[in-house]
Image: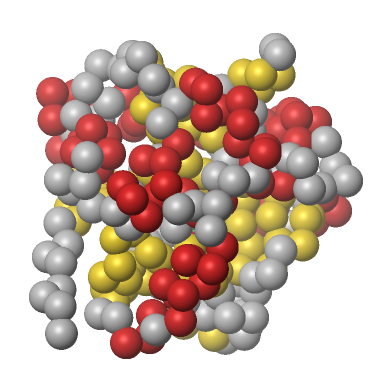
Amino acid sequence: MNKQTQLNWLTLSLKDLTASQDLISQIYQEKLHGIIIKQVFSQQEMDEVCQKLSFYQTNLHPTMYGETIGLNLFQKVMSDYDYFQESKDLRATLKKVFVTDFETNVESVFSQISGGRKIKIPQENGNYYTPATIRFVQPQQGGIPAHTGSEALYNTGYDYLKTQADLPDSMSYFLVIDKPELGGELVIYDVFLSKIDKEKKELKEFFADLKKNLDKSPQTLFNPDVGDMVIFKGSTIMHKVADVSGSKKRITIGGFLAVSHDNQSIYYWS
Ligand SMILES: O=C(O)CCC(=O)C(=O)O
């Protein structure tokens, strides 16, 4: 049996963050696999967000695990809805449901760990990408299946952003809005893509094979609290969201981060 990779994962509070640490570069280079930053939003604020979101249930997009508000870039070319219009709508919704400004808060956190790089939402032909999607994982639907971010890059929705940033080494971020009664943990498998593997991203069979025996691979579960932010190397580390039990949905908001080709900026989007 192969030796299990020692996961390098930190739990930090907001006051631990300093720009000089450049945690984003450390995750990008896989010196760190991931971090949890405690209480980026308070439980009270997220409870209010959760309550207000119940009035925004008309714009839900179905997925295999539940629904989203906002479209992700993968759906840009595959949905009947317009990605950029959905982005405008979601940004307006975020202004209404968050008491403190969502984008200002997450950008402030990112900039404290970005080694001085600027934090930007990508733009294409003057249209802003969506900074995040809101994900509702329905109970007893199997959770979010195992995946790595870089395996989706054959999708033409990513073509423009690939010219701007290093997408094969992107990172995932999400914040917990509401937790289920049981389950819904972030499951990290001891399966890391190499540079060669990432170049095989067009080969669907390669990823299908990789996923066949995942049950036998060592797993580490993370169960962040409401208001916590998770950032990890989602492009190269195989991960899933465990099935949710009970009657409550798991609600998160998040997307991806990538370093710009000129290394001066960090883009975030979903
Ligand atoms: O918990 C979430 O919102 C999704 C995490 C995930 O699977 C990802 O970011 O790729």
Asked whether residue 76 appears in the rendered view, the answer is yes
Q: How many marks?
A: 0
Residue depicted at x 32% and y 18%: 263
Q: Position of residue 76 (x, y in %)?
A: 73, 40
Residue drawn where x is 85% and y is 53% of the image: 58
**Farthest-out residue, right:** 80
Name the side, left or right, on which 108 lies relative to 60.
left
Work out which quarter of the rendered image holds the N terminus and state it.
Answer: bottom left
Assign the C terminus to one quadrant of the image.
top right
Here the colouring is secondary structure
On the picture, is 126 further left or further right than 236?
Answer: right
Place of residue 147 in the rendered image (x, y in percent of width and height, measured from the top left): 48, 63
Q: Can see residue 97?
A: no
Q: Nearer the viewer, residue 80 or 92?
A: 80
What residue lies at 30% left-to-right and 67% top-to-bottom?
A: 191
Depth order, front residue of 132/257: 257
Residue 176: % across, % down: 46, 56
- 91 sits to left or right of 82: left
At which x and y percent is residue 256?
47, 41
Note whether 152 is above or below 17 in the view shown. below
Residue at 42 percent across and 47 percent down: it is: 199
